[in-house]
Image (cartoon, rainbow, N blue to C red):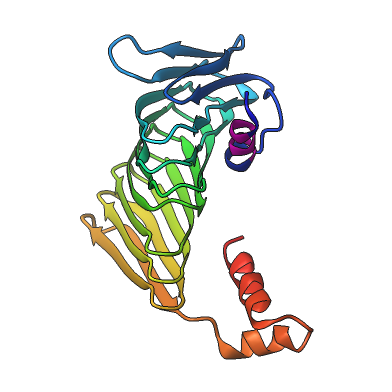
């Protein structure tokens, strides 16, 4: 594996070598490496590009790494990945996509991920997106995530767009059973003329189901962001959606929280806040010896932690 590809793996999956446990590395549209375990199987789809990740019931303290890296300019990559999380399991899945584009053509990765979380199963899913390269070609990523959580199941999803993605549309839908819960955390930064659109839709169908959707973003230069979070309370349930954004320079941010109660015992809350960095924050850090730019970077870094 070349240095560029190794650097991408480090950025998106914190990998400094071959990961332990189960993994599937996709490089420039092809299989770059795979390993399975006694409890986790990874199978190539026969009818379309992508894989099935099958985790046996009761599997605990294991992880799966499924990063995608692209280092060819002009490549468009599309995958369909299905995850089957067995009952009573407790696992971590680390995904992510990194593009290094040194040419003049657009490089694009679109991933459709479907999660079937079994009864009383617990899943943590981490996904990072990163773009780099010294060419003029654009880096585009459009992730679609479909979540189905059975009774008593739990899924925590952390998505981070680090930098370098010119255009992204991130669509996530979730349906929850009885006593099921989902926590979704998004961290996003745009700069230049980048465009980022996020759309979350959660259907709280089960009794005592719950959802917490949180987005934190920073928009710089002339970039644009649109955040739509929709929670439908269809049973006795609880839901919360929150969007906090820092706007800088000539950027634009639109936050659209939407909650709908279709049941008398649905308890739903939405919050949204957009604003610039407070002047007193900058002054306080500058009195400690930081330049204005360094102070801004410190504030942004702390906000996105």
Classify the position of the C terminus by image quarter: bottom right
Q: Give the residue displayed 44% in from the left and 11% down from the top.
A: 43
User: Against 46, is 79 above or below?
Assistant: below
For the point 70% across and 88% down, the residue is 284
Q: Position of residue 198 (x, y in %)?
A: 34, 54
Residue 253 image position (x, y, % from top left): 35, 70
* Location of residue 10 (image quadrant): top right
Q: What secondary structure is the stretch in magenta mostly built from? A: helix
Q: Is residue 75 above or below residue 182?
A: above
Q: Quadrant of the N terminus?
A: top right
Q: Nearer the viewer, residue 207 or 116?
A: 116
What residue sits 53% from the left and 25% below the top?
Answer: 88
Q: How many marks?
A: 0
Residue 290 to residue 117: above or below: below
Out of 248 and 175, give the one closest to the viewer: 248
Q: Position of residue 151 (x, y in %)?
A: 40, 33
Picture coordinates of residue 178, whole percent (x, y): 37, 38
Q: Camera-side residue: 223 or 188?
A: 223
Answer with left or right where residue 94 lies relative to residue 165. right
The answer to whether residue 225 is magenta is no
Specify the farthest residue to the left.
262
Compared with 228, 116 (above or below) is above
Q: Name which residue lies at 33% across and 61% down.
A: 227
Q: Which residues are magenta?
A: 4-10
Who is closer to the viewer here, 115 or 175?
A: 115
């Amino acid at each position: 594996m070349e240095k560029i590809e190794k650097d991408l793996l480090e950025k998106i999956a914190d990998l400094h070598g071959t990961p332990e446990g189960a993994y599937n590395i996709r490089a420039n549209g092809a299989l770059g490496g795979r390993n399975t375990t006694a409890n986790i199987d990874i199978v190539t789809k026969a009818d379309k590009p992508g894989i099935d990740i099958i985790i046996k019931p009761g599997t605990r303290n294991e992880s799966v790494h499924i990063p995608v890296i692209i280092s060819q300019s002009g490549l468009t990559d599309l995958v369909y990945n299905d995850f089957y999380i067995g009952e009573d399991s407790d696992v971590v899945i680390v995904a992510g996509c990194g593009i290094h584009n040194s040419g003049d053509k657009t490089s694009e990765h679109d991933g459709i991920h479907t999660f079937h979380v079994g009864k009383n199963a617990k899943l943590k899913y981490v996904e990072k997106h990163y773009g780099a390269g010294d060419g003029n070609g654009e880096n585009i990523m459009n992730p679609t995530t479909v979540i189905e959580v059975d009774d008593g199941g739990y899924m925590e999803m952390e998505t981070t767009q680090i930098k370098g993605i010119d255009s992204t549309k991130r669509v996530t839908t979730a349906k929850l059973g009885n006593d099921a819960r989902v926590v979704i955390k998004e961290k996003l930064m745009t700069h230049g003329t980048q465009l980022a659109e996020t759309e979350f839709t959660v259907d709280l169908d089960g009794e005592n189901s719950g959802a917490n959707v949180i987005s934190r973003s920073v928009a710089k230069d002339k970039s644009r962001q649109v955040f739509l979070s929709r929670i439908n309370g269809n049973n006795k349930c609880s839901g919360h959606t929150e969007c906090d954004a820092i706007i800088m320079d000539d950027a634009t941010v639109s936050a659209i929280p939407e909650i709908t109660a279709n049941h008398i015992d649905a308890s739903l809350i939405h919050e949204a806040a957009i604003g610039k960095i407070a002047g007193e924050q900058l002054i306080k850090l500058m009195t400690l010896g930081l330049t204005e730019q360094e102070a801004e970077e410190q504030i942004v870094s702390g906000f996105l932690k």
